[in-house]
Image (cartoon, rainbow, N blue to C red):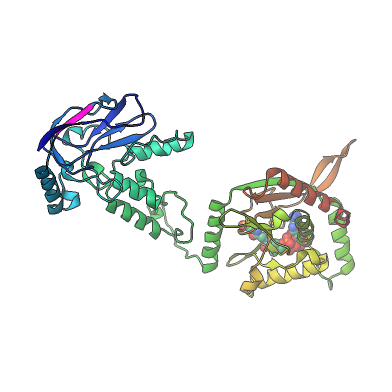
Amino acid sequence: MSMEIVRVPDIGSDDAVDVIEVSVKVGDQLAEETTIVVLESDKATVEVPSPKAGTVKKLLVKTGDRVKQGDPLLELEAGAEAAVSAEKASAEKPVEDKPAANKPAEPERTAEIPERLEKDAAEPPVVARQPAKPTPAAAPSAQSAQAEASSAAAHAGPAVRKLCREMGVDVAAVTGTGPRGRVLQEDVHSWVKQRLAEPGVGSGGMSGLPALPEMDFSRFGPVERVELNKLRKVSAANLHRSWLTIPHVTQHDLADITELEAFRQSENARLGKEGVKLTMLAFLVRVCAVALAKFPRFNSSMTVDGEALIEKRYIHIGVAVETENGLMVPVLRDADKKGIVQIAAEVSELAAKARNRKLTPADMQGGTFSISSLGGIGGTAFTPIVNWPEVAILGVSKSEMMPRWNGSEFEPRLMLPLSLSYDHRVIDGADAARFITYLNQLLTDMRRALL
Ligand code: CAO
């Protein structure tokens, strides 16, 4: 048996560092590698392990001291007896019950670090550590520094922190049930279990947002609960997923459709009641098909891993249809290969099928772009939600006569509000502006589609 002074090892710097935790007390029997102190420099937090098994005879530092390589930390009575006692103590008691200093740290394995000493209880909680030998961390980015700071403030041992890192859990988010709020391994496991049980998590919808609390509205007045049908629930889930996963931007514009509307009305008059009614929506489907052929990125989807775009060589346009049961988006196939009369007939047929609940799943699949027209109802603009896996959607509002300056005077012109929402991961703002400008030009003068 021999008395030894345990000193600060090589910590990768000659500068003094802070002792932020003394993890043992006099009389503790240590196993080799038990953490005895935690040091913190500007760049890293370092646990100093005991070089051998033994009994702590005297502490030579306290929390708040500043030490350098070679400075004494404690007196250790090293020897076989102490080591055996330490092992015996470990074997006899369950991990969570062990007295602080008897618990082997084994930062790369699963044990907890020793409990904090009573004298430290009033001090700030344990900070983040790096196990074993000091490895100065790279300077954190400004963004990660905040997250690190809150994780660092959590009261948790290295094994639990390692578990959190492996499971992608922010230790600061886990409520600790150990002494003084210490986060235990089982706390991490139950936190993960809870998160997995939350709605939407299994389908990849984990937003990291706190769950909304249930509200008892009857406290404020009479209420009635109306159950949602399946269509509304599915559509709500899809809209929510798109809203949370796609960074949306909406580009607005006003298209001069004075000539187009005059043409539409004259054609409808010519075709008469027997013919297909040419709707503004049919023209919009047609011009969108032309624009999608010119701007293929708007007709693409991003792979889930974000590594590539899948550009589709077909143009199938979904049309949002309001029904009694909720919103449906039947798809008009090969819009680029069809004339406006045929598009008008097919859109009218799809809308009727939607309202009569006759759409098949195939009628609603394969869309590459969507149009949502509220023009028959009203409003000046809105921000439609991209219908994932598509990357853009055109919202159409009610056309209105507006004074437009023609260079020498104001003229009344029929202006159609367009609102193009797009996935900004896939489409740049400049391209969106080009796309909507092109749509605008086509609507103003359809002859451009021939060019
Ligand atoms: N500006 C002014 N008037 C318009 C217009 C516009 N942009 N679009 C249509 N109208 C007029 C039409 O001219 C028509 O009037 P007339 O009967 O006098 O000719 C009237 O509005 C109804 O139009 P419509 O029957 O031709 O229908 P539509 O082509 O506008 O719309 C459909 C068809 C299926 C899109 C529509 O019925 C619908 O369901 N719209 C709602 C879509 C929706 O809910 N979108 C929101 C999705 S996001 O929550």
Q: Nearer the viewer, residue 121 or 27?
A: 27
The x and y percentages for residue 261 are: 84, 56
Question: Is residue 73 part of the magenta span, yes or no?
Answer: yes
User: On screen, 399 above or below 269?
Assistant: above
The x and y percentages for residue 144 are: 45, 38
User: On screen, 362 above or below 146?
Assistant: below
Give the overall secondary structure of the magenta segment. Answer: strand
Q: Quadrant of the N terminus?
A: top left
The x and y percentages for residue 310 are: 66, 59
Q: Nearer the viewer, residue 62 or 371?
A: 62
Task: Answer left or right for 124 relative to 253.
Answer: left
Task: Answer left or right for 263 relative to 84.
Answer: right
Question: Is residue 339 part of the magenta span, yes or no?
Answer: no
Q: Which residues are magenta?
A: 72-76
The x and y percentages for residue 140 are: 45, 35
User: On screen, 295 above or below 127?
Assistant: below
Q: Residue furthest front?
A: 1
The residue at 72%/50% (across/down) is 418
User: On screen, 280 above or below 24?
Assistant: below
